[in-house]
Image (cartoon, helix red, strand yellow):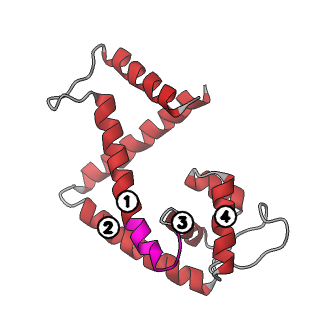
Amino acid sequence: MQDRELLLRLSLRSGQQTGNTGRKDNGMSRFEQFTVSIFSITHYWNRIATEEMREHGLKGTYALYLITLDSAGDGITAAKLCEMTQRDKADVSRAVSIFQEKGFVEAYGENRYRAPIKLTAKGKMIAANIREKADSALQTAGAGLSDEMRRNMYSALEIISNNLKDMCDD
């Protein structure tokens, strides 16, 4: 299904469930407000990640891979990394190849997709630096949110994500 068709389907479903257009005081529907907010957060996060990764000669999107690999400790397969980050196999494979060239992950044999990917000491150091800067960015971005608001936000986002996944899996 094309992205545009999916967005239209979600927009229509949102209006049907609320029984109205869901317009807010700012003139935007719930769908528009949700979409603009998510895209805006993604846009600014990507700018921050790109700036941080530039000094390592990497794409900003690779920051998530390094942090996820660091959290995995003893390593995870490329398939698991795809699943955990919701990224496609080709992008993960490119990133892992670049990480290997730069000495951020341990080298492995031919069966790359099934072998565990493990960060080297250099990779762990860079991942820790990225995590520290990401935590700082989130602290700044979340200024004014109480712990309860933050918990509710993450809970709501998880529910929305799962519901959208279920819709797409239908």
Does 104 sit left or right of 67 as displayed?
Answer: right
On residue 45, the disc is: 1
Relative image position of residue 101 (x, y in whole percent): 68, 79
Q: For the C terminus, give its image quadrant.
A: top right
Does 128 sit left or right of 123 as displayed?
Answer: left
Q: What element carries label 4?
A: helix
Q: What is the CA distance from the residue labelled 1 to the residue labelled 2?
A: 9 Å
Determine which residue is flagged by label 3.
Answer: 62
On residue 94, the disc is: 4
> Is residue 77 highlighted in magenta?
no
Write down the quadrant of residue 26 in the picture.
top left
Q: Is mark 1 on a helix, strand or loop?
A: helix
Badge 1: residue crowd in 10 Å (few <14, some 14–19, many ≥20): some
Q: What element carries label 3?
A: helix
Name the residue type under label 4: Arg
Foreground label between 4 and 2:
4
Name the residue type under label 2: Ala
Q: Which of 153 and 95 is in front in this view?
A: 95
Q: Nearer the viewer, residue 19 or 63?
A: 63
Looking at the image, do the residues carrying marks 2 and 3 touch, with CB atoms under 8 Å apart? no
Q: What is the CA distance from the residue labelled 2 to the residue labelled 3?
A: 17 Å
Relative image position of residue 148 (x, y in whole percent): 26, 51
Determine which residue is flagged by label 2.
Answer: 137
Looking at the image, do the residues carrying marks 1 and 2 touch, with CB atoms under 8 Å apart? yes
Residue found at x 35% / y 38%: 35
Q: What is the CA distance from the residue labelled 4 to the residue labelled 1?
A: 21 Å
Question: Which region shows up in magenta?
Answer: 48-58
Residue found at x 49% / y 33%: 164
**Extreme residue toward the left, this view:** 25
Badge 2: residue crowd in 10 Å (few <14, some 14–19, many ≥20): some
Can the viewer see residue 38? yes
Foreground label between 4 and 1:
4
